[in-house]
Image (cartoon, rainbow, N blue to C red):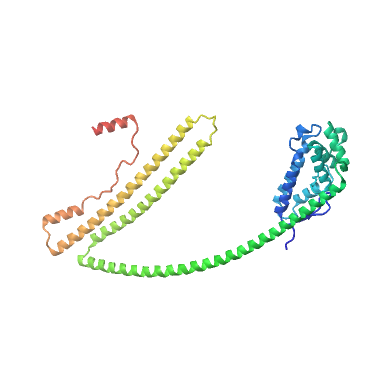
């Protein structure tokens, strides 16, 4: 069995307090704070003879203990030890009374029998904080008298019986808690063992699956290389038969270059539009979140206009840049197709020339097609339309 997180004696308690875990002492502090919360609840209105600061100090003392315990790594933390010695063991006027001590039970019994105000005066008198001359009402005096003579509240043996019952109940609760904690630890260890076993089995399954996939991939690559080799052989035979010359190789190289550029532009277009759509949704979400977070007393008309204008400008820029990227892609596509056509026409011209079957007119037609100017496929007006009055009138007159 593991050692308790902390064990200490509280003022006036017959047996030391034993806490197995930090959570158990936090639960104890929370229960004590809730049990004594009637001391500082609406204290200034109900007990005018006492300073409201007294009420808040005891509530703050329990809250401070909760904070120190949460921040402590173990029971040797300096702040935790200082709070424990000053607030639970000390004899100062700011010490915290524990509910299951004799004086704590006396105060709670006075509170139940004579009311909250009497209970508060009994608490202040017990910790040495109040003086008899401070009493202002009958309830104040009753609380002072009952705190000095607790036997007046009930017979002494009833208090002893109640104390023993409470102690037995707390011990039983602590035993059940320890049993539950041990059971939970055992369950956690069993779960961890099963988890590690499943993890090992999963890793073995993944390794075997990866090995099978790797073998299948290797077989597929072999078949693909064989097929590509057959295609390459066929292509070489065709090129040999057509007696390729330097112009054919040149235009094929150009076609390959434009094809690579075309693929690059296609990927760039896809990535750009994906990023653009995400950016558009993100900007729209941020704008809507900003508008919804505005205070109700602010005029939103101007904000709507500014946000709408910004969204319009942002959207216009996105689509304008996308339009340019698409045109660059189409340009590479056109140039690739043109280069491929020139290569085919060059092969045809060489074959016709070698066989001597082409007439001068046919040669002229082929040569004109081969050496025609190469279009770039880009529309020169890539800027946004002129939105001025002069630009609109110019387009209207041109259209007519």
Q: Which quadrant is home to the C terminus? A: top left
Residue under the point 73% across and 52% down: 25
Q: Is residue 48 above or below residue 318?
A: above
Q: Is residue 272 above or below residue 226?
A: above
Q: Which quadrant is home to the N terminus? A: bottom right
| Count of picture labels | 0
Residue 318 percent location from the top left of the image: 40, 42
Relative side of 279 to 26, left or right: left
Residue under the point 33% across and 36% down: 385
Residue 6 percent location from the top left of the image: 76, 55
Quarter-wise, where is residue 186 in the image? bottom right
Residue under the point 28% across and 52% down: 335
Residue nearest the observer in this picture, 59 or 295: 59
Residue nearest the observer in this picture, 322 or 28: 28
Quarter-wise, where is residue 200 in the image? bottom right
Residue nearest the observer in this picture, 339 or 221: 221
Asked if one can make out residue 131 in the rendered structure from this viewpoint, the answer is: yes
Residue 149 percent location from the top left of the image: 88, 41
């Amino acid at each position: 069995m593991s050692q308790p997180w902390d064990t200490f004696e509280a003022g006036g308690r017959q047996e030391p307090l034993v806490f197995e875990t930090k959570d158990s002492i936090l639960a104890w502090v929370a229960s004590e704070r809730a049990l004594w919360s009637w001391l500082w609840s609406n204290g200034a209105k109900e007990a005018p003879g006492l300073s409201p600061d007294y009420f808040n100090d005891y509530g703050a003392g329990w809250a401070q203990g909760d904070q120190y315990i949460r921040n402590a790594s173990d029971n040797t933390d300096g702040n935790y030890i200082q709070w424990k010695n000053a607030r639970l063991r000390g004899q100062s006027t700011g010490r915290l009374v524990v509910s299951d001590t004799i004086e704590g039970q006396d105060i709670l019994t006075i509170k139940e029998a004579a009311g909250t105000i009497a209970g508060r005066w009994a608490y202040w008198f017990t910790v040495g904080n109040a003086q008899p001359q401070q009493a202002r009402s009958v309830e104040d005096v009753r609380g002072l008298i009952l705190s000095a003579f607790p036997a007046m509240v009930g017979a002494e043996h009833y208090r002893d019986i109640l104390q023993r019952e409470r102690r037995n109940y707390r011990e039983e609760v602590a035993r059940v808690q320890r049993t539950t904690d041990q059971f939970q630890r055992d369950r956690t260890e069993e779960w961890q063992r099963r988890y590690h076993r499943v993890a090992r089995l999963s890793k073995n399954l993944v390794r075997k699956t990866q090995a099978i996939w790797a073998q299948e991939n290797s077989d597929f690559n072999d078949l693909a290389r064989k097929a590509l080799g057959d295609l390459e052989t066929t292509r070489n035979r065709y090129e040999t038969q057509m007696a390729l010359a330097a112009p054919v190789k040149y235009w094929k190289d150009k076609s390959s270059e434009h094809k690579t550029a075309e693929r690059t532009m296609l990927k760039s277009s896809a990535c750009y539009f994906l990023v653009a759509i995400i950016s558009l949704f993100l900007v729209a979400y941020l704008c809507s979140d900003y508008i919804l977070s505005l205070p109700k007393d602010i005029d939103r008309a101007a904000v709507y206009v500014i946000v709408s204008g910004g969204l319009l400008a942002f959207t216009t820029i996105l689509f304008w840049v996308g339009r340019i990227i698409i045109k660059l892609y189409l340009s590479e596509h056109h140039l690739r197709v043109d280069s491929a056509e020139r290569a085919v026409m060059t092969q045809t011209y060489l074959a016709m020339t070698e066989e001597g079957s082409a007439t001068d007119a046919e040669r002229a037609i082929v040569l004109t097609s081969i050496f025609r100017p190469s279009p770039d496929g880009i529309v020169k007006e890539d800027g946004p339309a002129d939105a001025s009055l002069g630009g609109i009138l110019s387009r209207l007159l041109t259209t007519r």
